[in-house]
Amino acid sequence: MSDAEGAPAGGRQDVWTEKYRPQTLDEIVGQDGITERLQSYIERDDLPNLLFAGEAGIGKTTAATAIAREIYGDDWEQNFLELNASDERGIDVVRGRIKDFARSSFGGEVQGYSYRIIFLDEADALTSDAQSALRRTMEQFSNSTRFILSCNYSSQIIDPIQSRCAVFRFAPLADDAVEKQVRKVAAEEEIDLTQDGVDALAYAADGDMRKAINALQAAAVMGETVDEETVFKITSTARPEEVETMIQTAIDGDFVAARSKLRELLVDKGIAGGDVIDQLHRSVWDLDIDDDAAVRLMDRVGEADYRITEGANERVQLEAMLASLALEAGDQ
Ligand SMILES: Nc1ncnc2c1ncn2[C@@H]1O[C@H](COP(=O)(O)OP(=O)(O)OP(=O)(O)O)[C@@H](O)[C@H]1O
Ligand SMILES: [Mg+2]
């Protein structure tokens, strides 16, 4: 979804994900265990280096900035440096900026604080050599700085860094957490949002709050009430029932009907094949099939997913999957 479509004119502050980004740890929804522990570090004035791991749009950057706001109040921006590790100019540039920032706070208290915070996003984009270099930099400035590293997969972070950090694994947000936040945004923006619209936002977002709020904003621009239909359309998501019907039809042996349903999703509705696979993956256990059949289906979903990721034609892969399900029905 492009910003031009999604957001009204008027600049960044009108992007709802920014406008409604929680400012305090308390306002972050759905990550209670994590925010409580972070809060207690702040209260004890004992912040360790931190490693935040988890998928996109679930509150990692938000938690880091909330920590800075709680510690430094209005001065937070002077005491918080945000860097992106995947900066294409390389680890040396990143380390250079870390050093400059850390040195400028070196030699004593920074406006009454004993350390400043460096937030390094996408730390898993660094090679292990670059991470080793980073680790030395972290040690060199351990008196005057605290690091918060953020990544999607903590397994990509070398052990010596992990062991120097308190590791927090952020989980994809539960539907009720997404619901709570989108309702809040809708209320503030005076958007008429139906219950099926809320459910559709939670389904389409699949745990990603950024996606949910962006979808709400894009749907709201179209005016009128935001309901399930608008949400599925704007997010190019199939209704779960549509995917389930398609698969059930194939399992019942009617390949031709299943194939035309697939065509409707891919061609008429413009849904990406990879997204159909993702949705199918989420639906497998909701289908009216026995466990053995579900296991076989899951196996095929995995195979199609892999092939599509490797560049195979999406439609061919999905049709082949439907064909093999239909053949299986014929064998029985
Ligand atoms: N747990 C949450 N509670 C409330 N709002 C959230 C939460 N997580 C994300 N958001 C909303 O989504 C936006 C993006 O979240 P954030 O920047 O924290 O994602 P992230 O986890 O750092 O993702 P990425 O891995 O893509 O950097 C925030 O500006 C905020 O509006
Ligand atoms: Mg982030």
Image: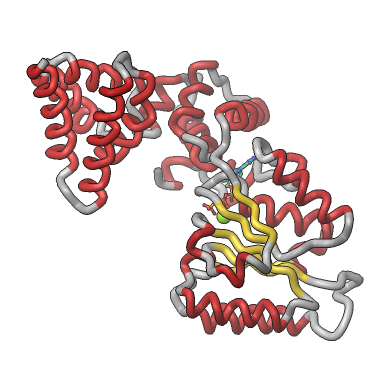
Residue 299 vertical placement versus 85 (above, below) = above
Which residue is farthest right?
112
Residue 142 vertical placement versus 181 (above, below) = below
**Viewed as shown, does residue 295 lie left or right of 219?**
left
Residue 316 figure quarter: top left
- Residue 178, image x, y percentages: 58, 31
Any part of residue 224 in sight:
no
Total numbered labels:
0
State the quadrant of the N terminus: top left
Residue 305 vertical placement versus 89 (above, below) = above
State the quadrant of the C terminus: top left
Q: Nearer the viewer, residue 210 or 189?
A: 210
Any part of residue 162 in sight:
yes
Q: Nearer the viewer, residue 101 or 44?
A: 44
Q: Residue at x 43, y 27 (%)?
A: 231
Q: Residue at x 46, y 67 (%)?
A: 125
Q: Residue at x 59, y 30 (%)?
A: 182
Looking at the picture, the colour scheme in use is: secondary structure
- Residue 330, image x, y percentages: 8, 17
